Image (cartoon, rainbow, N blue to C red):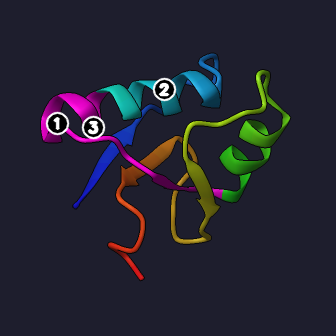
Amino acid sequence: MLLSHYDPDPAIPARQKLDDALARHMTVFGGIATVCYTSPLDDDELIASEPIDLPVTVKANTWTARGLFYVGREGWLE
């Protein structure tokens, strides 16, 4: 199951949005997410962010809008 988290505010860094999405996933599903599907622009921002050690595998998708993060368990979408 994937949880969607949308935050269109450009003033909030993508890393903070990802952390918020992961925390919400833990609250809603009680499990740790292992993958995040997001836009190529957010992916680029996450790669450039500090610290670089991201807690999940991030996969960029052209079908995902900027500011939208889908977090969940690996293999659910494949």
Give the mark, 1 or 2, whose residue is nearer the N terminus: 2
Q: Is residue 67 magenta?
A: no
Residue 60 drawn above or below residue 45 = below
**Label 1, on which residue?**
30
**Label 3, on which residue?**
25
Residue 73 drawn above or below residue 76 = above
Give the mark, 3 or 2, whose residue is nearer the N terminus: 2
Is label 1 or label 2 in front? 1
Q: Residues within 10 Å of mark 3 (few under 14, many from 20)?
A: many
**Residue at (33, 41) in percent of width and height:** 32
**Residue at (44, 31) in percent of width and height:** 7
- Left or right: 50, with 4 as reference point: right
- Left or right: 27, with 12 as reference point: left
- Region in magenta: 24-39
Q: CA distance from mark 1 to mark 3?
A: 7 Å
Q: Is residue 25 magenta?
A: yes
- Left or right: 6, with 56 as reference point: left
